[in-house]
């Protein structure tokens, strides 16, 4: 028993020596750590959020970042319940960052560290953003404008489209359209014809971000079918001025030169009563029966000056044209007609119906719509028409048929 007592005394002496050397200041005391820590992304900043759920002795907390080189200390006033910590940390570089959080009591005791990472967004992210695409913007029969938005990915972060437009009373409207990722359309009532929209798209980089990013303002035109305002007798179902069985001339406001009258001994041409697309009466040239068209012109001028802007001419046609022949649809300034081949460079715009690759080749019975655009810097009367140089007398010869013409203001 004496040996056992001696061993106990020796062991206690060693423990006391350890306490004296390593715990001379007393036991290590830790405050409770911050709970439920989140780092919310922002523009060159973050917001730190957390909870204090216990330990009423906490009086402050510190946030460390940049490898501990930078820090921020915030006071805490504890209540009897759960308290929330919120602090904005500004002036941060873009990218992923790690943050360490410690709590403290009034004697300087700290908690074990809590480490969280977060994303900081800035100029690089901003430069990647673009205005949401518009698939189509067009006037409707009720006087409204219908905007069809391009689909976006669910993680793209698009929040809103902020649109500015003008109504028919000259009143400007600003409207915010919350984003829907697919099949989104927006109706703008009482939209003023000939004007466009200005819009800005807003983004957030992730669902909990504290800052919204905006792209530069964009402008988009609103298409309007202005055919009936400026043109007439443009189909479907062209009307004739003269008619003899199958061939005739187009009724006003169409005009033609003598070269366009290639039928019935030079009295008719440019109109046919043939049926196609479910209706009869088309703009037409045909060279069968040794009736060529050389520098033939069919044209009409707009009934009033077109406002400055961009326009598209679209027409439906069916044709078979040899490579040594051509038909152009042309837009030219003024009301004096359309140019010949050597003056095409002076036209506002034009399109060629067919250009065969080799002599003798023919278009493969093309049936389609075709378009071209032109821009006016000032209001002007514009003449729209067809220029034909069609040779060939046998089968198949050359022909083309137009079903309708549309004038679209972009």
Image (tube, rainbow, N blue to C red):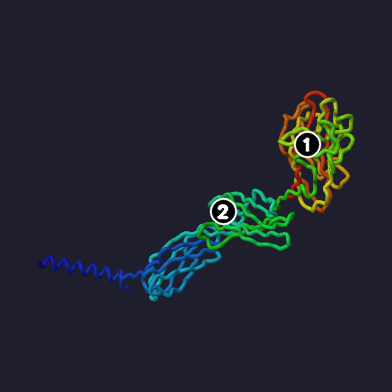
Closest to the observer: 25 or 307? Answer: 307
Image location (x, y in percent) of residue 221: 71, 52
In the shown orientation, is residue 331 left or right of residue 96? Answer: right
- Residue 105 position by quadrant: bottom left
Q: Residue furthest left?
A: 1
Counting other residues with Cα less than 10 Å from the Cα at mark 2, is it few (<14), some (14-19), or many (20 or more)? some
Looking at the image, how many numbered discs can be counted on the residues?
2
* Extreme residue in the top direction: 394
Q: Can you tell which mark lies on residue 222? A: none
Q: Can you give x and y, in whole percent of width and height, for residue 344 in the image?
A: 84, 40
Residue at screen point 71% across, 34% down: 367
**Mark 1 nearby-residue class (10 Å; few <14, some 14–19, many ≥20):** many
The picture quadrant where one finds residue 114 is bottom left
Q: In this picture, is 24 found above or below 129?
A: below
Residue underneath mark 2? 180
- With 128 as the anchor, is 409 left or right in this view? right
Residue 150 at x, y percent in the picture: 61, 49
SS for dot 1: strand
Quadrant in which the N terminus is drawn: bottom left
215 sits to left or right of 32: right
Residue picked out by circle 1: 282
Residue drawn 78% across the image and 28% down it: 322
Rendered location of residue 229, percent (x, y): 78, 50
Task: Tell me how far mark 1 sits from mark 2, CA to CA.
Answer: 44 Å
Callout 2: SS: loop
């Amino acid at each position: 028993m004496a040996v056992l007592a001696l061993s106990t005394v020796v062991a206690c002496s060693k423990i006391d020596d350890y306490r004296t050397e390593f715990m001379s200041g007393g036991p290590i005391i830790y405050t409770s750590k911050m709970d439920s820590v989140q780092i919310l992304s922002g523009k060159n900043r973050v917001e730190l959020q957390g909870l204090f759920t216990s330990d009423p002795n906490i009086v402050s907390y510190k946030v460390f970042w940049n490898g501990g080189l930078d820090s921020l200390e915030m006071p805490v006033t504890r209540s009897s319940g759960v308290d929330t910590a919120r602090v904005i940390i500004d002036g941060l570089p873009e990218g992923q960052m790690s943050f360490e959080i410690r709590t403290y009591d009034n004697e300087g005791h700290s908690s074990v560290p809590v480490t969280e990472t977060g994303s900081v967004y800035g100029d690089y992210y901003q430069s990647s953003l673009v205005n949401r695409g518009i698939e189509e913007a067009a006037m409707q029969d009720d006087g409204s404008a219908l905007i069809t938005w391009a689909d976006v990915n669910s993680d793209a972060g698009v929040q809103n489209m902020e649109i500015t437009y003008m109504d028919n009373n000259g009143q400007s409207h600003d409207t915010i359209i919350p984003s829907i990722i697919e099949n989104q359309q927006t109706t703008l009532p009482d939209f003023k014809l000939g004007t466009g929209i200005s819009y800005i798209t807003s983004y957030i980089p992730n669902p909990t971000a504290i800052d919204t990013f905006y792209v530069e303002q964009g402008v988009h035109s609103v298409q309007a079918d202005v055919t009936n305002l400026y043109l007439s007798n443009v189909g479907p179902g062209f009307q004739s001025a003269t008619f003899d069985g199958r061939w005739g001339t187009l009724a006003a406001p169409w005009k033609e030169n003598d070269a366009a009258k290639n039928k019935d001994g030079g009295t008719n041409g440019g109109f046919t009563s043939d049926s196609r697309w479910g209706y009869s009466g088309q703009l037409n040239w045909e060279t069968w029966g040794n009736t060529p068209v050389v520098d033939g012109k069919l044209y009409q001028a707009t009934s009033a000056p077109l406002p400055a802007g961009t326009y598209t001419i679209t027409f439906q046609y069916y044709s078979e044209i040899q490579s040594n022949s051509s038909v152009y649809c042309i837009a030219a300034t003024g009301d004096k007609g359309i140019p010949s081949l050597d003056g095409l460079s002076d036209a506002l715009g034009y399109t060629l119906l067919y250009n065969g690759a080799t002599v003798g080749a023919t278009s493969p019975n093309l049936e389609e719509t075709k378009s071209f655009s032109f821009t006016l810097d000032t209001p002007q009367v514009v003449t729209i028409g067809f220029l034909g140089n069609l040779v060939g007398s046998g089968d198949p010869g050359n022909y083309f048929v137009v079903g309708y013409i549309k004038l679209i203001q972009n």
